[in-house]
Amino acid sequence: MAGFLDRAKEQAQRGLTQGKQKIDDVQAQRAGGDLLKKLGAAYYAERRGSGSPDATAQALQALESHIATHGDSFLRG
C-alpha cells in the first residue's frame, strides 16, 4: 500500500509542476503580447507626431528584454 501511495504522491507532484509551468508559460505569452502592443502604440504615436523616438526605443528595449528571457514564441501564436 505504501508503494501505491508513494507513486500517487509522485504523480500528483509531477502534475502540479507541469501545471505551474503551463501557467508560467501563459503569463509570459500574455506579457509578450502586451509589450508588443505597447511597441506598436509607441510607434504609431511617434509617426502621428504625438509620441517620441525615446518612447519607441524604450518599448522596443522592453520587448527585446522579454524575448531574451522568455523566447519569441508569442510572436508565432
Image: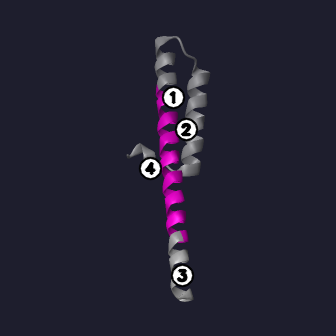
In this view, 74 is above or below 18: above
Find disc 1 in the rendering and name its residue: 38
- Mark number displayed over residue 73: 4
Amino acid type assigned to the residue bearing label 4 in the image: Ser
Q: Amino acid at mark 2?
A: Leu
Q: Residues within 10 Å of mark 1 (few under 14, many from 20)?
A: some
- Which mark sits nearer the N-terminus, 2 or 3? 3
Q: Which residue is mark 3?
A: 5
Give 65 or 14, whichever is nearer the viewer.
14
Instruction: State the residue in front, 41 or 12.
Output: 12
Do the numbered discs 3 and 1 sit on residues whose CB atoms are within 8 Å?
no
Q: Which residue is mark 2?
A: 63
Amino acid type, callout 1? Lys
Q: Position of residue 35 (x, y in %)?
A: 52, 35
Callout 1: SS = helix
Q: Whole-Å distance between the Cαs marked 3 and 1?
A: 49 Å
Residue 19 in the image: above or below residue 26 = below
Q: CA distance from mark 2 to mark 1?
A: 9 Å
Q: Position of residue 18 (x, y in %)?
A: 50, 63
Q: Assess whether mark 3 and mark 4 are in contact (beta carbons under 8 angstroms).
A: no
Regarding mark 3 in the picture, which secondary structure is present there? helix
Q: Can you give x and y, in whole percent of width and height, for residue 21 in the image?
A: 52, 58
Of callouts 3 and 1, which one flags the residue occurring earlier in the amino acid sequence?
3
Which residue range is magenta in the image? 13-40
Q: Are marks 2 and 1 in contact (CB under 8 Å)?
A: yes
Where disc 2 sits, the SS reads helix
Q: Amino acid at mark 3?
A: Leu
Closer mark to the observer between disc 2 and disc 3: 3
Q: Earlier in the sequence, mark 2 or mark 4?
A: 2
Secondary element at image label 4: helix
